[in-house]
């Protein structure tokens, strides 16, 4: 009989014995590490982690599940997603697979189909999937062109409340900066975001008055107590340099809130001097950066009939080495910006390791879907294993990195509050009614 999956004890207090933990995601436990992995016995009591002990030292009389060195991770954090766009591919594919094609397809589908019922049903499907895979915290960007901002934020708030005991949710308003010219809309958008506990977002472009628009954004965020999460430089054009402008604007405005930027693809195309200047400024401004390796590999450097030459990701290692908080995330799921994906942080991590070279060594790589994004999102209670925290854990048969990264880990066990959950994924057929022509 295979050692995994083990049978979990039916008891209020039990031990996950002989577990292998990613040390970077563990607090309050010091043990010899091999490739960033440590052996441990985890004592679970009342749905929480009671103690983290050296492997083989938990009290013999306690019920045990022997993991035989299988890995145990904290539940994952997916800090940059698009729950409002998810799963529209079947009704509105992107025939070219490129960025302009994605923009056009989403615009057409949004204007025709994104009523409250449609958005809610697709969000719910996405969350059921993420929960089953082991995610406990998600930030989504919501397309916020009028009147969609009111529809989607209202739905989001209802869904956030319904899911609060399973997945913690955050939302950022995504809108083109040109819409700031419509003062009535911008004022209304801020009101909607604030009322729904969201963040200000947006897409930065090399506009002649970019600095003034950034100042407007930062002042609005400061005046209303809002954090900021922006889509930045999602292009292979090395002349696009809005990342540096954002860092300078944060410093110039003495903005004290959190600022996160996603993508930053053009940074990898710039010469060394320009890239270093930008990275240094981002570090000085304490801006966090999230890379979206799967989506950007799909979209960037795509040209009909030719082979892509660039990976589409940002200068992840250089940013991290400069002290910038960095993470990776899913981004889009089965929509015109990314035709694939399943909001599975294991897939995101596995692909990020390969695309960004987060290996050799892998000692601290697990942080990019656990501790680091949790800290960036202001939730230090997520993305880590520590005594006193809920036993929200993901158990794997894989014992070492090569085993973990070579298979999709489909047989994982997801524990929430110390109990295994039903890992039946939602059936895509559940979405069939949304794919039919509404006319």
Image: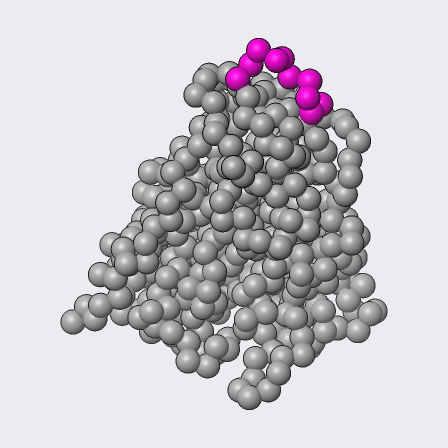
State the predominant SS element of the stretch in magenta.
Answer: loop
Which residue is located at x 51 percent, y 59 percent?
331
**Measured along the vertical axis of the image, is residue 433 above or below residue 2?**
below
Residue nearest the observer in this picture, 428 or 116 = 428
Name the quadrant containing residue 314.
bottom right
Which residue is located at x 72 percent, y 73 percent?
269
In the orientation shown, which residue stands out farthest toward the right? 273
Number of callouts: 0
Relative to 87, is 141 on the left or the right?
right
Name the quadrant containing residue 420.
top left
Which residue is located at x 83 percent, y 69 percent?
273
Q: Which residues are magenta?
A: 54-63
**Measured along the vertical axis of the image, is residue 439 above or below residue 257?**
below
| x and y percentages locating residue 29 in the rendered image | 72, 26
Which residue is located at x 80 percent, y 63 percent?
277
Q: Is residue 214 visible?
A: no
| x and y percentages locating residue 124 in the rendered image | 34, 49
């Amino acid at each position: 009989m295979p050692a995994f999956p083990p049978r979990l004890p039916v008891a209020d207090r039990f031990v996950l014995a002989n577990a292998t933990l990613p040390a970077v995601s563990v607090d309050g436990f010091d043990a010899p590490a091999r490739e960033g992995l440590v052996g441990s016995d985890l004592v679970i009591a009342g749905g929480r982690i009671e103690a983290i002990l050296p492997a083989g030292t938990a009290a013999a009389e306690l019920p045990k599940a022997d993991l035989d060195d299988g890995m145990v991770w904290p539940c994952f954090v997916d800090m940059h997603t698009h729950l409002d766009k998810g799963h529209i591919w079947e009704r509105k594919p992107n025939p070219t697979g490129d960025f302009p094609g994605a923009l056009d397809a989403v615009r057409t589908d949004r204007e025709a189909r994104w009523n409250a019922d449609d958005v809610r049903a697709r969000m719910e499907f996405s969350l059921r999937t993420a929960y089953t895979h082991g995610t406990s915290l998600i930030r989504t960007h919501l397309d916020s062109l009028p009147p969609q901002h009111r529809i989607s934020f209202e739905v989001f708030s209802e869904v956030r409340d319904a899911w609060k005991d399973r997945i913690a949710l955050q939302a950022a308003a995504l809108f083109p900066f040109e819409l700031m010219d419509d003062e009535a809309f911008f004022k209304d958008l801020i009101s909607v975001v604030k009322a729904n506990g969201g963040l200000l977002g947006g897409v930065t472009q090399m506009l002649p008055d970019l600095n003034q628009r950034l100042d407007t954004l930062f002042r609005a965020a400061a005046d209303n107590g809002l954090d900021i999460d922006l889509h930045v430089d999602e292009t292979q054009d090395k002349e696009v340099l809005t990342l540096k402008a954002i860092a300078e604007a944060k410093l110039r405005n003495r903005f004290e809130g959190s600022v996160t930027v996603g993508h930053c693809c053009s940074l990898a195309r710039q010469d060394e001097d320009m890239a270093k200047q930008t990275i240094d400024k981002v570090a000085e401004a304490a801006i966090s950066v999230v890379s979206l390796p799967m989506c950007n590999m799909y979209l960037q450097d795509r040209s009909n009939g030719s082979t892509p030459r660039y990976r589409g990701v940002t200068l992840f290692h250089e940013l991290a080495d400069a002290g910038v908080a960095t993470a990776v995330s899913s981004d889009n799921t089965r929509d015109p910006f990314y035709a694939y994906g399943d909001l599975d942080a294991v897939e995101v991590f596995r692909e990020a390791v390969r695309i960004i070279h987060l290996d050799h060594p892998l000692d601290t790589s697990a942080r990019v879907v656990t501790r680091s994004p949790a800290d960036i999102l202001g939730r230090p209670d997520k993305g880590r294993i520590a005594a006193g925290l809920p036993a929200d854990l993901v158990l794997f048969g894989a014992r070492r990195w090569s085993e973990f990264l070579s298979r999709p880990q489909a047989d994982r066990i997801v524990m929430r509050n110390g109990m295994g959950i039903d890992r039946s994924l939602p059936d895509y057929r559940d979405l069939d009614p949304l794919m039919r022509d509404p006319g």
